[in-house]
Image: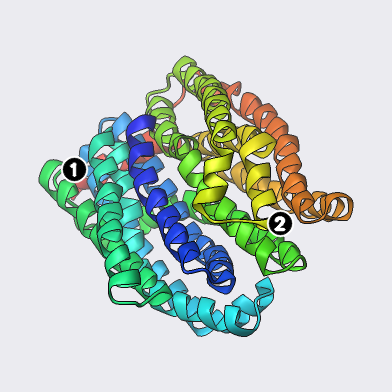
Amino acid sequence: MTLTASVGLMAIFLVDLVDMIFISMLGKAELAAAVGYAGAVLFFTSSFGIGMSIAAGALVARALGVGDVEMARRRSATAMTFGVVIGAIFAGVVWLNVDGLMRLLGASGDTLALGAHYLRIIVPSMPFLMVGMIGGAILRAHGAARLAMMVTIYGGLMNAILDPILIFGLDLELTGAAIASVAARITMGVGALIPIYKHYGGLRRPTLFEMRMDSAAIFAIGMPAILTQVATPLGQAYVTRAMAAYGEEAVAGMAIVGRLTPVAFGTLFALSGAIGPIIGQNVGAGLKDRVHQAFWGGLAFSAMVAVLVSALLFGLRGPIVALFQADGITAEIVILFCGPLALAFYFNGVIFVSNAAFNNLGQPFLSTLVNWGRHTLGTIPFVILGGMWFGAKGVLIGQAFGGFVFAVLAVILVRRVISRDELKGHKLSPFQRQARLMRLFNFRR
């Protein structure tokens, strides 16, 4: 599940990285900085899609775990509907406030104008991204890891084909990169719907009564999950603003690291999405031992990935700096990432796995608590101290140290939740009770 999902994710992340390479080749620091600022805003918008996909994946997986395929189809449709509506509304709000958001992050002058232009092209395509992300979660809930992988690969291929044509062939520079991203999002949306209809019966239109029932379950997980995900871009926005104090070259270095990170650690990003359905189905079936094994196996797998990837980055740090034509503080930040900061990303992996466990164990509030703590108390004071002691590099060092503190807290909380009696299997879960209620309702009707 993880390896196939990581291939799909890395297809998208790799294209984003290639975007940055192409933009760096243009030799304009303000372009790279503009992408860095815009990336923080896009990260914020995509957090809504991540939150809704978590809810969809958890609910569909639990419905399948109790053996109710019709409930799974209905919940898929309800989650998709709410996701598109919320995505469209949120995209409109962000689009109207692009300039203010860029200024809030510390952008000014040409960098602000370039970043705002880039965002105004991409942000309206958010509903298509929501369909792609929620559709991928639905496929993973069915165990269709390869099909979910192909959704993101199709988007990545579209972006990869259009990028050089639009950026260099038509000389559109940043505009071309934005248009290619929009085309990729549309491709992902279409690519997610086709296998859902072809292999899993499509999306069954719910009745009003069913919509009300599903909405309560979706938002019970979705809203805390969205709040959980929003914490990450807000924390990253603070880091971006702190880095802005050291100049556009420092922001450009951070932007390069921001694009390198998901490519290097795409496996850990994918792990949280893959382990969620496994935990969810076993919670639905009341198999506590398998829930326990999945969580600890996820932590061990994260450690293995972190060590291997960090060693690879350390060995390639010289070529990576040359690839981006980085020098000065930009190069120093990239080299720092290819050393101890990469190894410290393991603690983010621990938090990813823990949040997936919370969401599928029926404790989404704990996921929200951990993520907000990590990106407020676990970011702001450490970033301030790191900047005071080590300058621009200290900003990222402080951010990494905060991850260690909250990773430990997350593991302690997950252990307590798994140990509760509700998972021993002698009681019906809320989702099993709802499944029985729905079957009774349909029988009487």
Q: Residue at x 84, y 50 (%)?
A: 390
Q: Nearer the viewer, residue 172 or 277?
A: 172
Residue at far top of view: 289
Q: Label 1: how many residues lie within 10 Å, few (<14), some (14-19) or many (20+)?
A: few
**Residue 104 appears left or right of 301:** right
Q: Residue at x 56, y 31 (%)?
A: 315
Judge whether 424 appears above or below 70 on screen.
Answer: above
Q: Are marks 2 and 1 in contact (CB under 8 Å)?
A: no
Q: Amino acid at mark 2?
A: Ile
Which callout, 2 or 1, points to the residue nearer the camera? 2
Q: Secondary structure at mark 2?
A: helix
Q: Amino acid at mark 1?
A: Phe
Indicate how the structure is coloured in the image. rainbow
According to the picture, the residue beneath numbered tag 1 turns out to be 443
- Mark 2 or mark 1, which has the lower sequence index? 2
Q: Nearer the viewer, residue 14 or 404?
A: 14
| Residue 327 position in % (x across, y down) | 64, 56
| Label number found at residue 256 | none
According to the picture, the residue beneath numbered tag 2 turns out to be 329
Judge whether 422 appears above or below 5 on screen.
Answer: above
Q: Label 2: how many residues lie within 10 Å, few (<14), some (14-19) or many (20+)?
A: some
